[in-house]
Image (cartoon, rainbow, N blue to C red):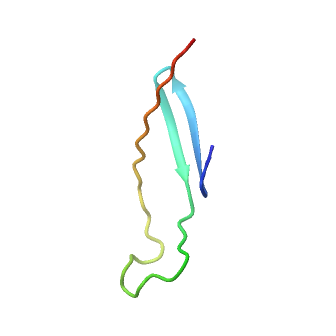
């Protein structure tokens, strides 16, 4: 599944357990103001919350 400029992958491990991953390259259209950000090379950890309703017929 492709979301905007990132890529999400999902894998069903058991009937009620899934594994998700989302990868995206962070980009900026212009330069940030001096001293407004963190140094290059800093890593981020994001939590993604999802909700899904499914009806099996």
Residue appearing at x 40%, y 42% in the figure: 49
Residue 12 falls in image quadrant: top right
In the image, what residue occupies the spot 47% across and 26% down? 53
Looking at the image, the residue that sits furthest to the bottom is: 34
Tell me what residue is drawn at x 44 percent, y 64 percent.
43
The percent coordinates of residue 32 (x first, y second) are: 45, 81
Relative to 39, 24 lies left or right: right
**Residue 48 position (above or below residue 36):** above
Horizontal arrangement in the rendering, residue 18 relative to residue 9 (left or right): left
Q: Position of residue 45 (x, y in %)?
A: 41, 56
Looking at the rendered structure, the number of numbered marks drawn on it comes to: 0
Can you say which quadrant of the picture contains the C terminus? top right
Depth check: give the residue in front, 8 or 53: 53
- The foreground one among 40 and 24 is 24
User: Can you name the residue that lies furthest to the left here?
Assistant: 35
Residue 55 vs 41, above or below: the answer is above
Which of 57 and 33 lies nearest the eye of the viewer?
57
Q: Please give the name of the residue rendered at 61% of the width and 58% of the height, measured from the top-left corner.
A: 5
Locate residue 13, reporting x and y percent.
53, 27
Q: Residue furthest top?
A: 57
Q: Position of residue 47 (x, y in %)?
A: 39, 49
Q: Quadrant of residue 50?
A: top left
Quarter of the N terminus within the rendering: top right
């Amino acid at each position: 599944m492709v979301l905007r400029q990132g890529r999400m992958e999902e894998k069903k491990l058991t009937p009620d357990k899934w594994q998700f991953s989302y990868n995206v390259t962070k980009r900026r259209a212009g330069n940030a103001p001096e001293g407004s950000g963190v140094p290059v090379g800093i890593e981020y950890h994001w939590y993604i919350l999802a909700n899904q309703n499914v009806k099996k017929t």
